[in-house]
Image (tube, rainbow, N blue to C red):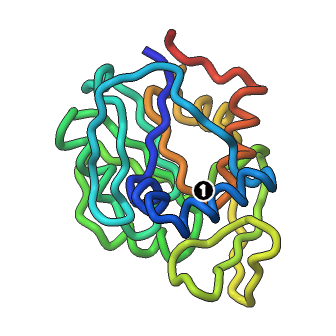
Amino acid sequence: MGLQMGWNMTTKEFLKGSRGRIKHYVRLIQGEEPRVRPARRCNTLCLGTGEGRWCICPDHINKSSVVYSVGVGMDLSFDLALTARFGCEVWAFDPTPISIQWVAGQQLPARFHFQPYGVAGYDGTATFHLPAKNVVSFTMMPGLRTKTLAEAPVYRLSTILGKLGHHKVDLLKLDIEGTEYTVIQDLIQSAVPVDQ
């Protein structure tokens, strides 16, 4: 069993339209999106609703799996579906004030754990910007700046594993508004342990 990363069905569905495909290819050419092809095939299972719907390979997910869900915003449908279906514990991360406040007002199962800090390619503090057309999804990406700012602690995945006492991650969901690429690069460089 190795680390797997979920993908958001709404993004995949968006790319089905010709306009979406054109935008996707432009971002590929500009180096803003990696070209990813699956190395092997597996079963798929889609969990969650709306923009919170993600697809995973369920073959090796069970009650003892370590699941990290990074960037929850105001939608826990994927996270709660994982705990209900597999009985696994989910550690969710989101440092943004809107998400922290929203999660605090929810009735959540004991197997769901929320951490009010972010994941990045470094340990420290990050400045988050709220894009003008979005009411939830803060971003660390430069160029999308607005007047609504928040500063919050962020940690590398390897640091978080140590903080939470985990040795590996079985499922990693990243929905962090474009900074996924720096986290993945750091994940590879720091050789976060995965069960082969």
The residue closer to the viewer here, 143 or 84, is: 143
Specify the farthest residue to the front.
18
Q: Is residue 72 left or right of residue 84?
A: right
Where residue 150 appears, as percent x and y from the top left, is 69, 76
Seen from this angle, which residue lies furthest top?
196
Residue 189 vertical placement versus 124 (above, below): above
Eyeballing the image, is 185 above or below 7? above
195 to the left or right of 189: left
In the rendered structure, the answer to whether residue 97 lies left or right of residue 139 reads left
Mark 1 element type:
loop
> Is residue 118 depicted above or below 104 in this figure?
above
Say few, some or many: other residues with alpha carbon within 10 Å of mark 1 (under 14 / 14 to 19 / 20 or more): many
Residue named by callout 1:
117
- Residue at 55% across / 82% down in the picture? 134
| Residue 106 visible from this viewpoint | yes
Across and down, in percent, residue 145 comes to: 77, 81
Looking at the image, residue 144 sits to the left or right of residue 14; the answer is right
The answer to whether residue 155 is visible is: no
Quadrant hosting residue 143: bottom right
Tell me which residue sits at (32%, 20%) in the image.
60
Identity of the residue drawn at 33% across and 59% down: 76
Identify the amino acid type marked 1: Tyr
Residue 61 in the image: state x and y as whole percent: 31, 26
Q: Where is the N terminus found, in terms of image quarters?
A: top left
Q: Where is residue 106? Give x, y as percent.
A: 28, 68
Identity of the residue drawn at 18% across and 43% down: 84
Count how many numbered circles sit on residues in the image.
1
